[in-house]
Structure formats: C-alpha cells, structure tokens
Image (cartoon, helix red, strand yellow):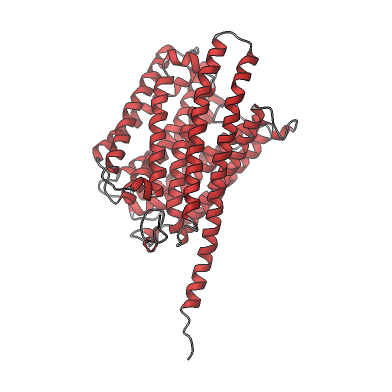
Amino acid sequence: MTANTDITGSPPENITRHSGEELVDRPLVWCYFLTAMGFLVISMLAGLLMAMQLIRHNPLNGIELFSPGRWRMLHTNAIAYGFLANGFLGMLHWVVPRLTMRPVFDRLLSWLIFGAWQFVVLATAVGLILGEAQGLEWGETPVWIDPLAQLGLLLVAINFGAPIMSMKGPMYVSLWYFLAALVWTFLTYAMGNFLPQYFVCGTSAGAVGGLFIHDLVGLFVTPLGWGMMYFFVPILLKKPIWSHGLSLVGFWGLAFFYPLQGIHHFLYTPIPMFLQYGAIICTIAVEMVVLTVIVNFFVTLSGTKNALTVNLPIRWFYTGMIFYALTCFQCALQTTLTFQALIHFTDWVVGHAHMVMFGVFSMWLLGVMTYLIPRLLNHDWYSRDLAEWHYWLSAVGIGVMATDLILAGPFQGWSWASLRMWDHSIELSIPFWAVRVVAGLTMFAGQLVFLYNLYRTWKLSRLSPLLLEVNTVPVKA
C-alpha cells in the first residue's frame, strides 16, 4: 500500500463530510467506540484469567473476588453488553440519521442513554464479581440491574425508532433490520431476565432460557450486524447490493425461523420433544437463509478488483461473513440429535460461541471502527501497517482459537462416552487449552496494537488544526 492512499485504497483527502452527516453527533459516536474498546479489553483480560485457570496457572488463585467462575460471566457480559452494545449504538448514531435524513429523537436523550448504559454495564460487572449473578446463561445480570437495563432498551428504541418511523415511502433494508432489532431486543431481554426469575420454573424456565440465549444473538446482534453490513459494504465497494429481493428473503427468514431455534441448547432434556424437533428444523432452515445472504454479498463483491487486498474494512467485513457461514453450517450439524450426543457440554460449543461473537460480529464492528474513526477525527490512520497487524492478529487468533476448541470437543466427548475417569478428559484437554491461551494472547495483542494506532491518530488529529493555522499565517516582508 502506497503512502498516498488510506485504508480503503482511496486518496486520504476523500475523508470528507457527506450528505446527512451534519445530522450525526460525531463526539457521541467517538465516545461509544472508545467505551466499546475499553470493555473489549476488560472482557479479554477476564477470558485470559479463565483460560489460565484451565491450564492450572491461575495467577490469582485463592482470591475470591478474582474467581475465574465470576470473571467468566464478566467475560461474556462485557462482550455482549459492553463491547457489542456500545459498538452498535455508536454505529446506529452514524447510520440512522444518514439513512433517514433526520436526527435521532433527542440528542440530549442520546447522551443520557450513553451515560446510563455505561452505569448499567459497570454495575453488572461489579454485581457479578461480588457474586450477585442470576442463574441463567447470558442473563446473569443482577436482579436490581434488570429494570434499569429494560428502561434503557426502551429509550434506545424510542430514540432511533422515531426517525425511522417518521419516514415516508420505502425503507432501505438496513432500516428494516434496525427497527426489528429495537423491538426484538426489548422483548428478548424482558423474556430472559424476568420470566424465569419470577413467573416460570422447571422445564418451562429451561425452555424460556434456551430461547433467550439464542434470541440474544439472533434478534439483537444479528439484525444489527447484517443491517450494518447492508449499509457499509455498498458504500465501500461503490456499487449497490446485488439483489434487494434476496436481502428481504434474509430478513424474513431471520424473523420467522430464528426465534424458534433456542431450544436446541437443551436437547435430551425433559422439554417436550416436539419443541426440540422444531428447534432442530428451524436451525437447519436458518442455514439455508444465511446462504442467501452470503451469496448476495459475495456476488456483490465479484468484479471488484483487489477489494479484499486494498480495502481493509472490506477485508474485515468479508472475513466475518466467512466465519458466519462456517458458524451456521456448524450449528446446523451440531443441533442434530446424533451429533449433539457427542459434543454436548464440550469445548466444541465454546469454539462455536467464540467464532460467532468475535469472528463475526466483533470483526464487523472492528472493521466499521477502522473505517469510521478517521472520519470522526478528520485524519487518516497514523499507520497503515499497524492497522494491518490489527487485522491479522485478530483474524489468525480467532481462527486458531475456534479451530482448536472445535477439535477438542469430539476428543472430550469420546472420552466421556468411553466411561473413562473424568481426569482423563481433563488431561487430554490441557494441550488444547494451552493453544487457546496463545490464540487469546494473539487476539489481545491485536487490540493493543489497535488502541496504540488509535491513540497516535488522535494525537495527530489534535495537532493538524494547529499546523494548519501556523501554515496559513501570512509572513511579513
């Protein structure tokens, strides 16, 4: 890459304001991205603590507040509500005003939501560390946080829903996804955090918990992620999406099949078998739907010369799409009863979760940040090489981690099926867990490189106006 081009392969002077950008609250987008990266670092440190515990090298052994079990919950919640939620909210503040040509409902409310959401995430982290978790996977937030989080999600829906609903005429598919996500997320959070806690129990609570686990990914993260891709990919490729019809097939397929597949987390349980069979069928159907979306984006990419090598954000996006296709194909396999009997409770599932949460949606958000931060700061990246290192350390790290854990799963399952002593499965797992530590450190190094590049870019952006002022001062004869 030559010095006179930016990360998209375009001249750096192309970092200019476009139509509708005056409606964007740029400082707010910047703050959301910064806090998202902060929570990503915290989450990865918590994951490292858990990984070190598994290979019997916990550096904080015996300290209750640093118990890996507690920090494992912090690891997952900081990713979902700290990194992904903050990143998506920052993205929405950039995209929605530009697609609707209207500001959000209230800018003061936007800043109120920002502050309140950081309080919710930090309070959740403190509550988890102090041992106040609920007994629900992905819904461990303390009970006194849930009403605040629910109110925050309602305010978010109002703030972004108002400009979308005020539009007249057809809406671009990104807005379909965003509007659906605003409604679905509010309902999903209420279902998962209030119904099992106060209204249902036993197998009914298990069924609701299964729906919540998967709907949090499918009805919160997925529609925001794909809506984001439908906005940024055509802009960066400078060509329209190949098929608007296929984009709607993807949307309605997601809406119809995804909410029904969460029970596949609880196969071979007392939950009625017709619900388990329905979840399996819907999971396989979602893979067919995902194929239409993947085909749509890769046909759009075809004919675009050197886009994956020259345009770094596009490389982030399409790497995430490849991981997404692999994730959904893997999911369609692992939900069959035969396959599930082998890999249930194994690290196969852990590798699957990391592939989708980091390999797909985190990669997409990091690609968006790579594209938008120079536009927020009005200055190109300090170093293209550091931006490349960020991508490669992240992509290779998650690829190795997911592959390693997915391979570990069948070995663990076969060990259990052979009725060997439990210690046998632990011993055979430790080499895989050691590789996971190395892969996690690689991913973490990538984020540190990104933060250093971000800091140096910010420093240069602060100096640029001063240099411009000095260079334009007339010199006396």
Counting labels gives 0
Quarter the N terminus occupies: bottom left
Quarter-of-image position of residue 17: bottom left
Q: Is residue 26 left or right of residue 41?
A: left
Q: Is residue 52 left or right of residue 269?
A: right
In the image, what residue occupies the spot 38% across and 62% down? 16
User: As drawn, which residue projects farthest toward the top?
Assistant: 419
Q: Position of residue 81 (x, y in %)?
A: 53, 40
In the image, what residue occupies the spot 71% across and 35% down? 59
Q: Position of residue 398 (x, y in %)?
A: 50, 35
Q: Is residue 249 left or right of residue 42?
A: left
In the image, what residue occupies the spot 48% across and 81% down? 473
Is residue 375 shown above or below 184? below
Q: Position of residue 466 (x, y in %)?
A: 52, 72
- Identify which residue, 434 or 217, lies in the foreground: 434
Q: Confirm whether residue 20 shows in the render.
A: yes
Is residue 454 shown above or below 300? below
Q: Position of residue 401 (x, y in %)?
A: 52, 32
User: As drawn, which residue projects farthest toward the right?
Assistant: 62
Q: Confirm whether residue 117 shows in the render.
A: no
User: As drawn, which residue projects farthest toward the front?
Assistant: 2
